[in-house]
């Protein structure tokens, strides 16, 4: 669905993210490493492209200024991803109440 050229660009970018997941200590790198433990590389690449497209849409759709959430201080284990999501959502909601 959508523009095939844009999809291709998202997959090319996601391929780079997946290839460098072992050296990336950010939350995204951790998420990709956990995904690669469960899925094939190509499926993980398409999942990262999908996540990127959804993030871009979420940032652009409301026509507001983007405020990045605070990054986690420690790199979580694969089992800690849901608790990390809760912490980020709590931080974002706290920031929005200010």
Image: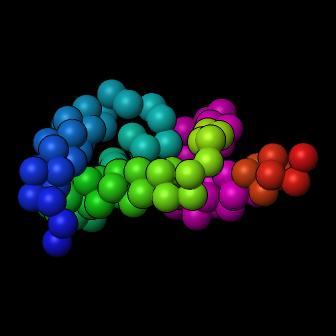
Q: Residue 62: x percent and y percent?
A: 57, 58
Q: Nearer the viewer, residue 3 or 53?
A: 3
Return the residue found at the far right.
Answer: 98
Return the residue found at the far front.
Answer: 63
Return the residue found at the far top.
Answer: 23
Q: Which residues are magenta?
A: 69-90
Any part of residue 36 in sight: no
Identify which residue is drawn at 26% across, 53% down.
Answer: 49
Q: Nearer the viewer, residue 23 or 56?
A: 56
> Is residue 21 shown left or right of residue 3?
right
Q: Residue 21: x percent and y percent?
A: 30, 37
Any part of residue 88 in sight: yes
Q: Residue 93: x percent and y percent?
A: 78, 57
Q: Is residue 78 in the magenta section? A: yes
Q: Quadrant of the N terminus?
A: bottom left
> Is residue 38 shown left or right of residue 3?
right
Return the residue found at the far bottom.
Answer: 1
Q: Nearer the viewer, residue 74 or 54?
A: 54
Identify which residue is drawn at 56% across, 51% down.
Answer: 63
* On screen, residue 83 above or below 60: below
Image-quadrant location for residue 86: bottom right
Count the marks.
0
Q: Residue 50: x percent and y percent?
A: 29, 60
């Amino acid at each position: 669905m959508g523009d095939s050229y844009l999809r291709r660009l998202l997959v090319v970018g996601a391929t780079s993210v997946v290839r460098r997941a072992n050296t990336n200590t950010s939350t995204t790198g951790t998420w990709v490493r956990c995904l690669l433990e469960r899925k094939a590389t190509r499926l993980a690449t398409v999942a990262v492209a999908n996540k990127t497209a959804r993030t871009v849409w979420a940032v652009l759709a409301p026509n507001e200024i983007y405020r990045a959430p605070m990054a986690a201080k420690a790199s979580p284990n694969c089992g800690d991803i849901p608790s990390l999501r809760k912490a980020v959502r709590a931080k974002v909601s706290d920031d929005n109440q200010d």
